[in-house]
Image (cartoon, rainbow, N blue to C red):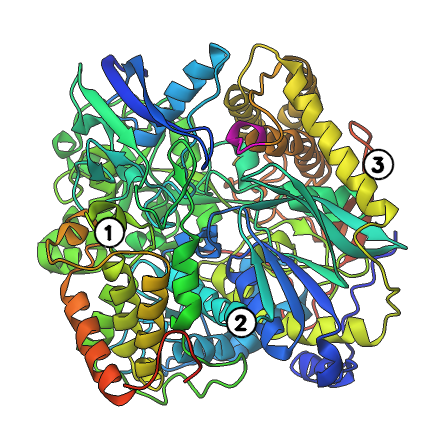
Amino acid sequence: MILDSKIPAGPIGEKWTRHKFELKLVNPANKRKFTVIVVGTGLAGASAAASLGELGYNVKAFCIQDSPRRAHSIAAQGGINAAKNYTNDGDSVYRLFYDTVKGGDFRAREANVHRLAECSNLIIDQCVAQGVPFGRDYGGLLDNRSFGGAQVSRTFYARGQTGQQLLIGAYQSMMRQVAKGSVKMFPRREMLDLVVVNGKARGIVVRNLITGELESHEADAVCLCTGGYGNVFYLSTNAKGSNVTAAWRAHKKGALFANPCYTQIHPTCIPVTGDHQSKLTLMSESLRNDGRVWVPKKIGDTRSPDQIPESERFYYLEEKYPSFGNLVPRDVASRNAKMVCDKGMGVGQSKLAVYLDFSDSIKRLGVSAVSAKYGNLFQMYEKITDENPYKVPMRIFPAVHYTMGGLWVDYNLMSTIPGCFVLGEANFSDHGANRLGASALMQGLADGYFVIPYTIGGYFASTKLEKISSSEKEFEDSKKESSERMNKLLNIKGKRTVSDIHRELGHIMWENVGMGRNKKGLEKALAEIPALREEFWKNVNVLGSEGSFNQNLEHAGRLADFLEFGELLAQDALHREESCGGHFREESQTEEGEAKRDDEKFCYVGAWEYKGVGQKPELSKEPLTFDNVHLVTRSYK
Amino acid sequence: MSGNMNLTLKIWRQKDSKSKGQFETIKIGGISPDMSFLEMLDTVNEQQMKEGKEGFAFDHDCREGICGMCSLVINGMPHGPDHAITTCQLHMRKFKDGDTIVIEPWRASAFPIIRDCAVDRSAFDRIIQAGGFVSVNTGSAPDAATIPVPKDQADRAFDAAACVGCGACVAACKNSSAMLFVAAKVSHLSYLPQGKVEAKKRVLAMVAQMDKEGFGNCSNLYECQAACPKNITVDFIAKMNREYLGATALYAEKVYGEEM
C-alpha cells in the first residue's frame, strides 16, 4: 500500500498554518448534522469530545470505566512540556521540535512534531483557563522545571499529579458539553468492532458492560483515543483495563498498524515481588534529578547497601555518561539497568533491581528539602515496599510504560480507513522510536484540542457521506460476530484462567521482545505466541454469561486480541534489524554497547496490513525525510 | 514468592441491582504480606474460578491510587484501615495471619450496586455537569501568564483539586452525604480567579444537583475526612457553605437547576 502522509508543502514553520487555511470548513449551522464518535476519554478523547462539542458537532463519547475521569492519562505524574520560554533559558518552538525529533531517534515525522511543538503553548493557556492548578512561584506566576534530561526548563507540573489535573480539566470541559447536550456520554461501554460501510468508518459496536447488551452506534466519523498496548506484556505501568482491543479491531478492518515494536521501558519503577504481582508502579523520573543510581561492583554481593563502601559501588550511569549522568534518556537508563542485572550485579531478593540512592542529596539538602520535592513519591514507595527511602536506597527496575507505535495516521490524524481518526497514544505519529518525558500529555491534548477540530472539518467538507442507520447489514454482521466470539469464549470451559494465560503471554513478551531483542529470541516468541493462542482457544475457562456484568469475559476478550497483537509486535521487532530508541536489537550495537541505527535501511515508518490470524501481515513503508534536524547519532556521553 | 497468611473473608455477593445480596464466607491461604489488597482478591478470584465459580466483581483500574475507581468498605472502613490511601494501595502486611476481613461495597442509595462490590457512581458525573467547570471554549484562552495567582491560593486550590472522585466520603457518612466531594470541586474552582466568574452560579447548581441525586446532609462528624484517600479536609465544606450563603443572598429568587 502506498502511504500518503499528506504533509503540507512549505517551510516547516508554516506547514500547519497553511494547512489550517487550506482545509475546507463546515458551516457553523451544518456542524450539528454531523455525528462524531469518540472512543476513550483520556486526555486525547476528553479534549476532542469537549472541543468538537463546543464547535457544534453531535458527539457520542464512550469509555470502559465507570466515569470518563478515570482514564489512565490520570496516572501521569511528571508534567507537560511547552515552549513558553517563561524561564528565559533559550527555549523556543523550534528547540522543542528539535529535541523531540532527536529524542525520538529520527523515526518520527518532522511535520507532525513541529505542529506538536506549536500547539504546546496553546495547551498551557487552555488548561490554565480551565482552572488546572499548575505549580506556581511566589510571584503567582507559573513555575517550570527541567525534566527527562532536557537542557531547558520547559515542563509545567501540578505536584506529582499533572496527568490527573489535566484530565480533570478536559473532563470538566466535556461534562459542560454533556450538560449542554452536544456530547452524549456512554460510560462502561467497550468497543468491540469498528463498522465500515462503503469503505468509510461509520460507527462502532459496543458492549454495555453492565447489562452485557450489544449496541450499535452510527456516526459520520470515529475517533479512536484508546491509549497504548503496554499490557501485552501483562505487567506494565498501565491500568489493568488498558488494552489494544479498539485499535486491533480497527486494524482487522483495514487500518494499518505502524511501528508496534516501539515500546518504552521506563527506568524507575518498583520491582516485581512475586507471581501475584498485578501491575507495576512507576516512580516519577524526576527522582533521577537527585538520586544516584548504583549497584555493588562485586557480583552476587548480598551485603546491605549501607555496608558497601563507596569504592565498591558501581555508579554505572555517572561513569559511562559523564555529561548526562543519572539523567540520560529513559531508553539508555533502562538498558543499562538490564545490563548490570544480566551481569549478576542486581540487588534485592529477585536480583532484578538497582539502587536509587538519595543519601548524598539528603546530606547536601537536608531531609526537609528532599521531602518537599519528593515526599509523596517516597510515601508511595514506602506503602508498597515497606522500606523507608530516607534511610535505605530505593530499589528500582525498568517496566513497560508507554507505546510509541500505534495505528498509522496521516497528517490529519486519519488512519488508512477514511473517517477513522486516531488520537493520542493510540496513534504512532509524534514520538518516533522513543518518547521524551512530559511529551505524552502534550501530544494527547494537542491532538484533541487543536488538531482534530480542524482536520475532521476538512474531512466532512470534502467527503460525500451517505445517509445510514444502525440497522444496516454491516452493523448487524458486527454484532453477530462479536456475540459469537463471546459465546465461543464462554463455551471453551477449559482448565486455565484468563490471568494465567495472560501472565504467560507477558512472560514470553518480556523475555524475548523486551529491553534487548535478538533474532533468536524473536523467532522463539513468534513460535510461542501462536501456540499459546491455540492453547487459549482450547483451554481457557471463562465463567458467567454474556448478558451480565462479567469482568472475566471482558478480560478474556482483551487477552484474545493481545494474543494476536503480540505476534505483530514481535514480527515488527524481527524485521527492524537496527537499534533505535526503545527498540534495541542486540545485533545492532556499537563496540561500547550503544544502540546503532541503520538510516540507510530503516529510515521509514513500518506499517502493517492485517491478512488474517496467523497469516504474515504485509509491510508498507513510509519513508522519513529530515530536512531540518539532520540525522546524527544520539550521544549522551 | 507466595506467602503464608491464612484469612477468612466475608465478601458481599449480589447478582445485580435488583437482587438481594448476602455475605459469602471464603477461606484463603498462601497470601503474601507483599500483596496489595486487590492482588489478594485476584488470588481469591483465581481460586474461585478454578473451582468453577464466578469471581467477585469489584471496580479497579490504575492500581496506583489515582484513578479513583477502586472502592470497597473493608472491616467497616472505606478503603480499609490504612490512612490516606485508596484500596489498591493497601497491602496485606496491614493484616495478620488468621484475620477475618469483611468486604462490602460503598453503601448509599445514590450509588446503586451493579454487582457484588461494584457500584454506579454516575451521580458524581451529573454533579460536575451541573456546574463543576469553567466555561471556556477551546481556543479562547488568554496567555497563561496573564493572571498571576497567589501561591497560597493556588496551593489551596490544588489541595481541593486532589480529590479523585472515589466516593469514600459518601460511603463513610451515616447520611451518605456527598458534601466533601462537592466542596472539593467548589473550592478548587473558587480559589482560582479563572473560576471566580461563575462561582455563585456553580455552587448553587452543584448543591441542587447533589440534593436531587439523593445524597444526605452533613452532620459534622468528619468521617468523610477520615476516609478520604487524598486528605481532603472538612474546612472545604465550610468554604462551600460560605460560598453557598453568599450566593443564595444574591440569587435568593433562583431555584434548583434553572438557568441563571
Residue identified by numbered label 2: A177
Q: Identify which residue is drawn at 46% across, 55% down.
A: A73
Q: Position of residue A511 (x, y in %)?
A: 53, 26
Residue identified by numbered label 3: A611
* In this picture, residue A19 sits left or right of residue A102: right
Residue situated in front as seen by the camera: A563 or A97: A563
* In this picture, residue B120 sits left or right of residue A143: right
Residue situated in front as seen by the camera: A507 or A579: A507
Residue A551 is a magenta residue: yes
Q: Secondary structure at mark 3?
A: loop
Q: Looking at the image, tell me whether mark 3 or mark 2 is earlier in sequence order.
A: 2
Instruction: Examine the image and state in which quarter residue A252 appears.
Output: top right
The CA span between labels 1 and 2 is 27 Å
Q: Amino acid at mark 2?
A: Gln
The CA span between labels 1 and 3 is 51 Å
Judging from the image, mark 3 belongs to the subunit labelled: A
Residue identified by numbered label 1: B169
Instruction: Examine the image and state in which quarter residue B189 appears.
Output: bottom left
* In this picture, residue A40 sits left or right of residue A235: right
Q: Position of residue A213 (x, y in %)?
A: 64, 39
Judging from the image, mark 2 belongs to the subunit labelled: A
Residue A105 shows up from this direction: no
**A573 vs A217: above or below:** above
Residue situated in front as seen by the camera: A601 or B171: B171
Judging from the image, mark 1 belongs to the subunit labelled: B
Q: Which class describes the residues within 10 Å of circle 1: few (<14), some (14-19), or many (20+)? A: many
Quadrant placement of the C terminus of chain A = bottom left
The CA span between labels 3 and 2 is 40 Å
Q: Position of residue A485 (x, y in %)?
A: 72, 28
Look at the image and give the residue range highlighted in magenta: A548-553
Q: Amino acid at mark 1?
A: Cys
